[in-house]
Image (tube, coloured by chain):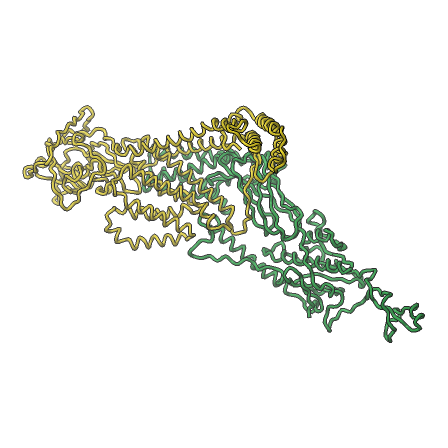
Amino acid sequence: MITQARRDRIALPVVVLYWFVLFGGLALYTAVRAAPGSTTGLWIGVILGTVLGQVAALINLRLWLVVASIIGLVYCGAPFMLFGGDDGHFWMALIPAVLCGFWSLGDRTSLISFWLPTVLWMLTILDRTSASGTTLAPDGAGAALLLVLVVAFVAFLRVRESRRVAMWQSVGDTAIAPIQPSRVLRERPGMPFARTAWTLVAAGIACGVTVFVAPRLWQMEHLAAKQRAGNAMAHANPSGILPCCPQFDEPERARVTEYFDLGRGKEQSSHIPTIDCRVCGDSYRYGYGGYGGYGGYGNPSTDRYGRGALGGYDNAGELPATTGEVDVPAPVYTPPTPAYALPTPSYVPDPSTYTPTPAVPPLPTIAPPVVKPPVAAPTRPTIAPERPLPTPEAKPALAATFVPTATPPATTPGKAPVSWLVIMMIGALAFQLARIGLRPLRRMVTLRHLRKPFWPETIDQQISNSWQLALVGLRDAGWRASSVEAPREFARRTNIDGVEHCATILERARHGLGIEATDLADMSAAAEQAYRSSRAQLGTFARAAAWLRAPLT
Amino acid sequence: MKARTMRIGVFVAQPTVLAAIVALRGDNARLHGAVSVLVALWVIAAGAIAFRVLDARRLARTASADEAPSPIEHVDLLTSSGAATLMLGITALFASSLAGWASLSVVGVLGLGAVYLAVAWVAIAAGGDDPWRRATIARAILPELATESAPIREEITVRDVKIPAGMRLFVMGRATPHAPITRYVIESEGSHAEVALASELGPAPRGEHHAPPLALWLGDVLGLARTAVVHRAPASFTVLPRLAPVDGARTLLGKGGDDAAATPTHILPTEGTFRTREYLPGDDTRRIHWVRSVNAQKLVVRLPDEVPTAEPTVRLVLDTELAGTGALATRAPDELLDAMVRVWLGIGKALAEDGIRVTLVTACRAGGDAAITKIVERAYVPRSRDPLKLGARVAWQTAIPLAAMLTADDKVRELVVSCRPRTLADRAPSWVVVPERSWTLPEPAMPVATPITTPFPAGSADNRGGRRRDHKRRILAMHQDRAYFSDVMCTIEWNVASGSVIARPQADRVGLAVIR
């Protein structure tokens, strides 16, 4: 029967890798997007839930008990859900975290347990996904993150299978015989390289398939349509009068649908009015809630569709707390003198890019507000921008002929962490390549020392060195020595010239028998002969590949 | 079979579900592209499987058809984890088309892609008989001639098995029906290599054992797919019975019995010439020592005072006639037979050391042929291994009844070691009863399923409901069979055994007591 220590030991790689992927997803998203504190609920929910789930699995609790515990938690926490201030992210994270954590150590549940880590990584990946046009694919960094996710999944499957195999060898409803470690007596030279090649090819195919297929299954969530519908409702007069037409077509926002309602919004222009409206000449629209600016990146002040809780251009609390469209009579309103001087918008629209559609009704010429007065909003907290807001120069001027141009790069502030991640990955890869590349040098130095020590050594040690030299050659040819096998037995098994003579002298040295004057020279010559004879059995490729082999014996 | 059908069904149904997803999402060129890739992967995997099935049919026509897996086994490439991953993956894709969550689509593609690639790789690289064509698998249970209860070990040497990269070789076997299961794993570094495996099998059970072949298969390192199982390397080994010292074996020769059914002493030892006494009325006149009587001028009779020159002969018969033990799930019949053999040989040894000529008689398998049973008679020679080898060959049998093993010569003393003394026509042998209750161990306890925790660590396949039910059924069958076996054994005709001897375990010895 398996001991508690052993079962914990074989579960450790699964737990470590799972936490690594979870923390990676959380940390990456936090570093890339979120404002400080805005993902606290998410962090706590994921960590607490995963700990609960994995502890439940490690103490062999049944699934129904875990589900009952979740129901109890939700029941007790319902009041906090209703009045909580984090949009329910804590609970949205906690429940799947418990289940996925539990299933991460379960049987046949690899895929479902990997869903939560995938969700967390997708927050960042989708943040780097272009939602314009018909293509829906992550950019280079997003694709790189997706590849990392695929590799993590394959690694997760592998460590889980290793754990399952370890349990298969020690746990069962019938008695399992204790096995001794297997001994490779002779191996085929070059197999490690075949395994490495297979790993690279398999990972490459898996990555390619996933990166090609998965984005094609993503679905866009068009936010502007919903907003327009909401706006129409907001403008609908009880007397049946049509609402005012907007002064310009609101930029449509779109994102890829995901479990967590966090960020990932991208803009795209749209010039097709979809609501019936009337021209309102004496008023101008102000505080377009639907134009959430660059909000919606996990800011708690955004609602599900990324609309800024702060109206207007979402410039960090300077505007009234409106969430919808507000008509403000121009003559009545006297804006206070701004405490700062706004620079003149330097944005020059490019008329050549604008192609009005015939269906567009003539838009009224309304002067855009020169100044957007900051109105005190004592009841609403001032929310710091989660990332540097665009400068006023970058804001589109409100004009009848305004045509939004290309969306400004929404991910500029989050570029650094992803870039660093990519650099780290490249660095790790380069480190591995360097390690492999340095193996021939290491081997060369070692062999040189075994043949002619760099420093004075005892006779016994030099004999041992010669034996090691023979072992290196034998290992090149696939022969492996083991600690339970005497040198002469090993020599007889290999039946290679020089090895038996080496083993005889080595055993004499080990047993303290007298070493004759010529023994050292004989040993050296026999070891060299064994080394060369062993390698003579190999082909050119195998001989070359042996220089990259580690360990040497 | 049910699980296999389900696994195959899950794999076969994939394109249908993918088509349903396409239909659900409507006309979407991007979706079509994605699904096309998945279907293409499925076609590659299915094509590889189809090729292997054709290959299996070809192999089935060759001489090694007995060892080759059936074609249906080549179709059943998914492990239960692989089938679950496939099912969850397609469910995730379906849910993603409904809910629109991108993570679900990623998880679905990961699951489906991983399984399709694993199946394709297993079918292409490890299907058919390629991995086993040059393989040499040597297996030995050591020591080859062991003694009962002594530890034995299994040693396997695997040579030249092709283990493609990304796969593992699984080896599983069981030396005897009640021995622990051995499970080995060799990574792909053991491909075309020579690998030594070993495990401890624990105490050796008595008998001549023919261990069934090992089951070998290859599985991918992700645990999603595996090859068909092949069976190789049966092994044979012999475990000699362990002799138990028997106390009071001499009582078997005429001193047993109660007043109602006393066993008279028929033959006294040969009279000596050193101890004499005066004749008393009633003495056997044949004992008169005439020479001394003439010298003493009175009648002198000889008294038995020396080891007889011709030992009394005892036929020690082991009763192995019992039907249906092979079908019982309980281990009690084997334990009881081991005990009977131990008592049988122990008595034989004790009597032989007392100078009695003992002939061991039993019915056992003839040589290496398990199908032929014959009566074997062997003189017990102390310090010889022959009696032990005979004891190792003993097994329950129905071919030869007990009566056929008994001799018709009334002058020959006959002792029958049996677990169920019974009335025999024209025979009234002396019995040495080996009671079942005293010599067998209780069955393993029924598994107690707690509603709170699982019986095995989370992630173990033995926690699955089906396996738990199977295990429970197995244990239940052991208990039921044990009850049935005990009933059969307890229906002893004690009146037949009255005056005979019962053998009971006393620590490491065997104690004999007269049944009164």
Specify whether residue A511 is in view.
yes
Q: Position of residue B252 (x, y in %)?
A: 73, 65
Specify whether residue A537 is in view.
no
User: Which chain did the renderer colour yellow?
Assistant: A
Q: Position of residue B68 (x, y in %)?
A: 59, 39
Looking at the image, residue A530 sits to the left or right of residue A119; the answer is right
Q: Position of residue A44 (x, y in %)?
A: 30, 47
Which residue corresponds to the image point at 30% horizontal and 48% vertical from the top-left?
A91
Which residue corresponds to the image point at 71% horizontal and 69% vertical from the top-left?
B499
Q: Colour of chain B?
A: green
Q: Position of residue A468 (x, y in %)?
A: 55, 32
Looking at the image, residue A319 sits to the left or right of residue B343; the answer is left
Report the number of numbered marks.
Answer: 0
Looking at the image, residue A412 sits to the left or right of residue A202; the answer is left
Q: Quadrant of residue B425?
A: bottom right
Q: Residue furthest left?
A: A331
In the displayed structure, would residue B444 be above or below residue B171?
Answer: below
Q: Residue furthest bottom?
A: B281
Q: Nearer the viewer, residue A450 or B100?
A: A450
In the displayed structure, would residue B81 be above or below residue B397?
Answer: above
Q: Nearer the viewer, residue A474 or B175?
A: A474
